[in-house]
């Protein structure tokens, strides 16, 4: 064979190999996302409440079908449904969870009462109380919530300071620190925003 024929064959095989590699990685990515999206919000909410017991449950609402309180219909399960079902955002990434919290805080897209999870299944739409509950969380609680949600859906992701349950821990007084001047951004700091 001539050198040009070998070169063409090489590039043909190379293109096929790259195509297969891209196809497989897309398949695995879609399968991972599909699996994450299929985890029941109530299951994830239970994990969140185990790790962050100070987050309000807001689970006092009465279910239309049974006329009884539905203890599994919680603030966090509705937040998850709002994120994945109403806004159609992925559940794997911290950024998407932050966008959802920004919706509740009135800093992004408005949360629409007429589309809110629970409006059809509960006797009272929990929209207003849920927005109040999320707005009552402090910055640390919101960051912890984002980290826990992302870590449950995407355990391989390396998250900073993801709270873990500690049943026998007692609160320790925080050390007194002196305020420091804020750091200005440096070149490359935007890379810290990546998931």
Image (cartoon, rainbow, N blue to C red):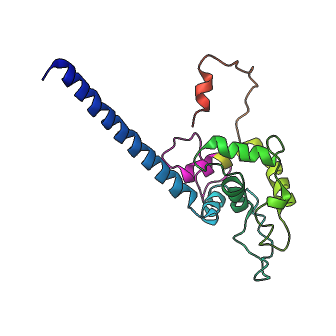
In front of the other: 2 or 89: 2
Residue 136 rendering spot, x and y as whole percentages: 83, 50
Q: Would you place residue 68 above or below residue 166 in this image?
A: below
Which of these two is toward me, 174 or 130?
Answer: 130
SS assignment for the magenta stretch, majority: loop
Left or right, 111 with reference to 172: right
- Which residue is at 59% across, 20% downward? 188
How far from the left and from the top, in percent, is residue 83? 69, 53
**Image quadrant where one finds the C terminus:** top right
Q: Measured along the vertical axis of the image, is residue 71 above or below residue 192?
A: below
Residue drawn at x 81%, y 51% as measured from the top left: 111
Q: Residue at x 76, y 81 (%)?
A: 65
Q: Is residue 115 left or right of residue 159?
A: right
Residue placed most toward the observer, 29 or 10 = 10
Q: Quadrant of the N terminus?
A: top left
Q: Position of residue 32 (x, y in %)?
A: 48, 52
- 58 in relation to 33, above or below: below
Q: For the magenta stretch, what is the residue range?
A: 147-172
The answer to which quarter of the image holds residue 160 is top right
The structure residue drawn at horizontal position 37% and vertical position 38%, both measured from the top left corner, is 19
Name the residue nearer the viewer: 28 or 152.
28
On the image, which quarter does residue 61 sit in? bottom right
- Residue 152 is inside the magenta segment: yes
Residue found at the very far left of the displayed protein: 1
């Amino acid at each position: 064979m001539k050198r040009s024929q070998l070169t063409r064959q090489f590039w043909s095989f190379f293109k096929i190999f790259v195509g297969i590699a891209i196809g497989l990685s897309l398949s695995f990515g879609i399968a991972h996302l599909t699996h994450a999206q299929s985890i029941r919000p109530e299951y994830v909410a239970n994990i969140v409440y185990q790790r962050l017991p100070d987050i309000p449950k807001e689970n006092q609402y009465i279910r239309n079908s049974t006329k009884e309180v539905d203890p599994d219909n919680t603030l966090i399960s509705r937040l998850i449904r709002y994120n994945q079902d109403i806004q159609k955002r992925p559940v794997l990434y911290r950024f998407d969870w932050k966008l959802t919290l920004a919706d509740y805080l009135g800093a992004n897209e408005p949360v629409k009462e007429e589309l809110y999870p629970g409006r059809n299944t509960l006797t009272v739409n929990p929209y207003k109380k849920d927005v109040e509950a999320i707005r009552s969380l402090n910055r640390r609680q919101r960051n912890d919530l984002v980290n826990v949600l992302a870590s449950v859906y995407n355990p391989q992701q390396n998250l900073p300071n993801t709270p873990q349950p500690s049943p026998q821990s007692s609160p320790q007084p925080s050390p007194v620190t002196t305020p420091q001047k804020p750091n200005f951004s440096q070149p490359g700091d935007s890379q810290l925003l990546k998931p």
